Amino acid sequence: MAPPSQQLVLAASSADAGVAAWDLRTGAEAIRHRPCSSRPRAITAVADRFLAAAQAPAGNSAPIHYYHWDKPQVAVKSFPAEPIRVLIADPEGNYLIGGGISGDIFFWEVASGELLVQWHAHYRDVRCLALYDLLLVSGSEDGSIKVWDLLTMLDEQSRLEAKTPYLYNFNQHALPVTDVACFHGAIAVSSSEDRTCKIWSLSEGRMLRSISFPAIIDSVEVDPRSHIFYAGGRDGKIYVTAMGVDPSQGRDDSSILGALDDHSKAVTSLASSTDGLLLVSGSEDGHVRVWDTRSQQVTRKFKHSQGPVTNVLIVTPKRVNLPPLQSLRKVCAANGEVEPRAVILPHPENDVHIAGNLSSNLLEHLLDATQQHGSSRLFDSGASTPNGAPNEQGEEWRSKYLELQDLFVHEVLGQMPSSMDI
């Protein structure tokens, strides 16, 4: 068995070639989980404890597979109500969120397998999801991007009272959305078949800028160290892109700082190490590349299969004794509605350290205070007052949360340089 500190590069394909795992330090293939055939953005490491992969439809079957790190075979197989196109987990590994081919979003609790809530989000396939704190961003085949407040979506009373189920609805992309990534929670970057990437303010609910590319962009990954992101193109190039625009140029293409060029076919997926020093790319050429982002050179090459690589991840497996994994349920309850139950409040993913910025710490403090008030539950039988009115404390919490998000995005954008050097 590999040591606990082992760092792995994972890659999956839409062909049934399994999920390959290579040791990042030695380059040796550690294990290959089979069977697995997944479309882009359909695999996720659940808090690095185990791997979940939504399978591409084969006949009438499109299950979700769970794999343990040290065993090649499927540990648990679930059969959701419809094929899941995209799958993510929250940072703590408490929940799985899936986007279906009907446009529905599914929200499962991992420990029980219970489907907590399901809602219709888009008119066509959900192709990408990004989660930060209590905001969920979804992108679709229909070209739209929607931002969901999970405080609202997980509470039946709040859903009924909301004017719209979503927080924001962005329709500026002309063609299907291919990927989305969040930057420090307040900014999102999306890519589309319309050959643009767009940057959004999640607190102001508006597009900040649009960047045009010479090729369709299928994947985006934010550099955690700085205000740049990587855009994987169908021309085989990875474009290094600044979030700011050089005002002296007056064109959005001035944001493209350079390109990493070593793949012979489309770049389908990207993953960054937590320190931003490594970038992993997967391509339709069947290869995986590991890049040193400082030198912009390839440090390792892995051959996955003859088929296209659709997903790449960097994980540090946690070899822990897990309770038995539960299969995911198809429906919420007998009547299709969510049964009233408690949901544990997610904790912020990270503590962002930006000079002069206190909003992340304030938000964490507010979350802690909310958890310590009475119980650590977000929604329970006290979600509404006895006469059915909304819980005033919950409304106040939501208002403060959005105020802090607004403060945070202004601080980030205020420090964002207009032009950047890598």
Image: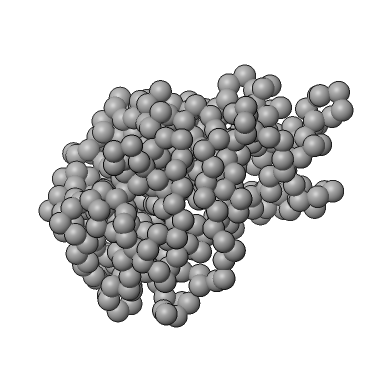
How far across and how far down the image is residue 142, in percent? 35, 25
Q: Quadrant of residue 176?
A: top left
Residue lying furthest right in this view? 386
Identified at 62% across, 31% down, the residue is 334
The residue drawn where x is 29% and y is 42% is 58
User: What residue is rendered at 59% in x and 63% in y?
Assistant: 323
Residue projecting furthest to the top? 163
Q: How many marks?
A: 0
Q: Looking at the rendering, which quadrant does residue 361 occupy?
A: bottom right
In front of the other: 123 or 298 = 123
Camera sees residue 356: no
Where, quadrant-wise, is the N terminus in this rendering? bottom left
Q: Nearer the viewer, residue 18 or 417?
A: 18
User: Can residue 334 be seen in this snapshot?
Assistant: yes
Which quadrant would the C terminus be assigned to in this image?
bottom left
Residue 27's x, y, as percent? 27, 75
Residue 416, compared with residue 21, is above or below; it is above
Residue 14 falls left or right of residue 207: left
Q: Nearer the viewer, residue 263 or 55?
A: 55
In the picture, residue 122 is in which quadrant? top left
Tell me if residue 262 comes above or below residue 319 in the rendering. above
* Residue 3 sits above or below residue 404 on the image: below
Q: Position of residue 74 (x, y in %)?
A: 40, 59
Q: Residue at x 42, y 29 (%)?
A: 103
Question: What percent of the width, then of the height, locates residue 211?
Answer: 30, 37
